[in-house]
Amino acid sequence: MSADVLELSDQADRLLIEEKLDANVFVEAGAGSGKTHELVERICAMVDDGTELKSIAAITFTEKAAGELRDRVRRKLAADKTDLRVRALDQLDTAPIGTIHSFAARVISEHPIEAGVPPLITVVDELRSQIAFTRRWETIRQKLFSDPGLDAALRILLAVGAKLDQLESVAAALDANWDRLEIHPPQPRPIPAVDLGPLLRQTAEVLEQATHCKDPKDKLVAAFESIKSWHGQLENVSTAELAAVLDILDSVPQKGFSYGAAGNWGVPLAGVRESCKDLAEQALALRNSFVAPAVDTVTAAMAGLIVEAARERQRTGELEYNDLLIHARDLLVGTDQRTVDVHRALHERYRCIMLDEFQDTDPVQAEIATRIAAREVCGNDGWKQLEVPPGRLFTVGDPKQSIYRFRRADIATYLDTQHRFTHSEHSRVATLRTNFRSTGRLLEWINSTFSTLIQEDGHIQPPYQALTPDPLRPEWDSAAGHPVSILGRNGAVAGESGKVTAEQMRQQEAADVAKAILLATGQSGQTAWQKQSKRSDKPSENFAPSRIRLKDICILLPTRTALAALEDALDDAGIEYRAEASSLVYSTQEVNDLLLALKAIANTADEAALVLCLRSAPFGCGDDELFEWKRAGGHWNLLAPAPEDLAESTVAHGMQYLKQLCREISILTPAELMDRIVTERRMMETAIASPRYRDVWRRLRFVIDQARAWTEATHGSLRDYLVWAGTQQEENTRVRESVVPETDVDAVRIMTIHASKGLEFPMVILAGTGSSPRPANDAALWDADGQLHVSLVKAIRSGGYADAQMVEKRFDEAERCRLLYVACTRAESHLVVSHYVHPSAKDSLGQHLKNADCPSVPSLELPAEPGAHEKPYNSVEPVGSWAEWQQESERWQEQSAVVSTTSVTAIAKGKGGPVTGPPAEPLLRFIPLDDETLPAPAAPDAEHGAVYGTAMHRVLELSDLQESADVEAIADSVARLSLGVAPVALAANARAALASEPVRRAAQRERWLELPVVAPSGGVTVEGVIDLMYREDDGTLVIADFKTDKQPQEETIAAYWRQLETYAAMIQRITGQTVGELVLIFCRESGAEARRRGAAS
């Protein structure tokens, strides 16, 4: 064993992890303590001890962590290939190493019948789950308002101000916790009868006390006047009008009761004031006696529908992430023979279960692991008391990093499990304190600060365990920059009003953050700070110093509130950055522009969408141009003709483009339409003008990818997609953007503290902590007994919610302190902490940090002004003269006019250019009536030629030229997908074509149907599709083309022959084979006509 290892203060605990394989081990691993390394060491030690890798279930928090763990295990096993390790390497790819959801899916797939699911299940991802919930909510809403039994309850809720989106929030909370609804199902409660008598009597008694006032000018008398007016309303209201009663109860006077002078009253003033306050309380209590039962009744109805939907997902096998955990858990609950058999199989298959990031494990995950590892089975309760055989369970986590309570992570589960391990004879507890990530000076500050902020509090907060530095790490050189420094220790400077607004505070903080970055990177005239690497396998790289660069710096924010000010300050300072957390993607300008284009083509009657689309950046129409269009008689309709004088205007070109897209709605998905718009309207290229162009690119790609996933999940129409996208905009839905690392950019990173979990950075700036947290109003809470309590808004709650909320508030406050710990322990060499706190934010995270401030930590001395720094890749060359621009423009126009691709049809018609756009005669046309009108269908005549011809070709292709084929059924199927095509006529024409002599010869010989051909010709690529080509007995080829013209003109027939001759030339050039004959087959119900011509040599 090397001296390096022996120097660790927690070496005994590390050896316990690696060597005590016959014990269950609970590991508390401090930040940066190398827990993944120890996890790998234990897995490999178990392999060396004879345990098969396929029987070790290693459960991680994310797929990324699972991939990293698998890779590190692979490298460790491959370093010393014993027979046992070679066997493990063979099993590694299929070993159960992954997230709890992937493990649950594996367990369910192994026992589908017992789990009540089909043999093949489908795991629904997050986006599809969101879409599915939207549909479930629509069903729930319809059933709520169509159930007569809920009429009274809904009327009460709507009367007191409940909104549908609040009910939807409750439904979403119930949906995410539907398993709890089965254990303790919410119960409806009857709405009591309205009895205002006691309250009227109490009001009269209160008003009577006003007679004891000796001075009519006493300020308390004014309160009695408002009570008197309210009493009159209460007397006159009909108890049958419950909504009116609730309005009056809501308006009970509640202010002005603290006034009055004792000498002006003949009775004790305190008693008068108390009676007034008690009246208000009784009025609100009466109101709540109606509201609380209504909330419970509607909640019970929604809960029943949600559980029903969950069971339907179980029957169909369409399982969401939470469903996986619940059904895997349910497999192991009970004492019947089925459960015993399933448990025995799982207990024998998985010899050890290892849980990483255990502090973020919810109770269901811990229950699954415990039940599989235990010897026995039990019912719903008692799983915490199950005896786990030694060596079956291994957990590792850091309770100080438990920050995912909003995802059902429960710190109480961690602390309770730790307690059980501590008192079990088969278990051991190990503590990893050595931090390999951060410097010693930085860890001193972290220990000093968080030993104050994190105080043990039962099952709410763990005790603080101090971190120790790597003993081999050299002392920090003060010349390399401050390990820890403070920004804004003296607070923000007040404005002209003498007060500090939240916006002013954020702006000053952001400016100081920018200056700190310039200072650290040496851009303010001083020497750049140094970073210190970690311990390395290469001695030359051990703790090697190097200068701080922009990409080494990460700004961490608890929320995105301060992001806008930060972006402005960094832009002003010329600092490149990347924001890598969730954002309001669907509310950004570029995405809004893209959706406007879709709205304009999805509904051609939506004039507002069309005008807004034309005004957007991708179409670039100015208000003056739109005004000229309207003044010239132009219509806001894609199908309307352009005014003669404006046929070549920007508006006309924009509308023509949208018109072309409109005709492709039926064949393109929303994602394909969006991709077309982004590409053809140069949205990526024009984004270069924005300083945040990479973010624009990323958002556009992201939205298109989401649209593609939406189509795969729903197969919905463009209008359906726009409804869904509109929901994303209206709800300001935050979307987690996938950020691909950009290795060519030296940029500061900005992310939320939650997003930074598991990451590390040479320098961290903790900012945005100076505002008060947003008041929590969870839609649904469960108390310690598992009982549900619901809140729509503060005044619309079920009974018991206030008490449950107080308990939840204590958990939230403790978690917020842990959030600070996570942020600060991301730093390796430098930590800059902002003390900018708004004066009113006494409970902010920043105030907590100020309360634990260490005076010895220096305030950062910043340069007076950050200065502006040019971004070379954003700069442009000087604009030349007008003549130079015209010359360059003409050159590009000439080059752009060169035809690169054309079709055989275009050549045959003498156009020689690429064929774009719809047929000459549209399927829809604009017919103005009076002033404006909607588009009307055109008469179904010749304009259906192209559509009809395509349908005919498809029928012949599907029949494979066999007369025995069911042509009528094929024609019927094809006609359903072809606008205006009659299936009977289509089948008759196809039958005639099949009976023609050329087709019969082709059917008996080598043949090719719908054959695509491409060939170069004079710098132009010519492409086309040959309807039919077959080989004659002499080896020559015959090319045939099916036509549906009833009475073709001579010039049309000449064009057809040119088309076939072009095909013949292309085939001869491509294959070198001879085309002997060309055939035109005119398909008619009365019989096909074949015209022949020899191919030109």
Image (cartoon, grey):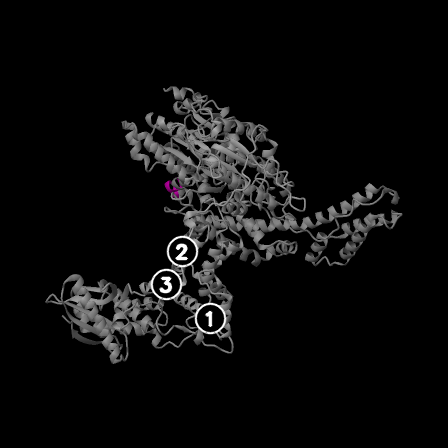
- Residues 243 and 439: in front is 439
Instruction: Answer few, some or many: residues within 10 Å of disc 1's Cα (few below 14, many 20 plus, some between 14 and 19).
Output: many
Amino acid type, mark 2:
Glu
Looking at the image, residue 1053 lies above or below residue 530 = below
- Residue, disc 3: 889
Any part of residue 334 in sight: no
Local SS, label 3 = helix
Amino acid type, mark 1:
Asn
Picture quadrant of residue 987: bottom left
- Residue, disc 2: 685
- Residues 559 and 806: in front is 559
Residue 110 highlighted magenta (yes or no): yes
Residue at the extreme left of the image, as rendered? 1034
Mark-to-mark CA distance, 1 and 3: 32 Å
Looking at the image, residue 549 lies above or below residue 883 = above
- Residue, disc 1: 637
Mark 3 or mark 2, which is nearer to you? 3
* Residue 615, position as x, y percentages in the image: 49, 63
* Residue 868, position as x, y percentages in the image: 49, 45
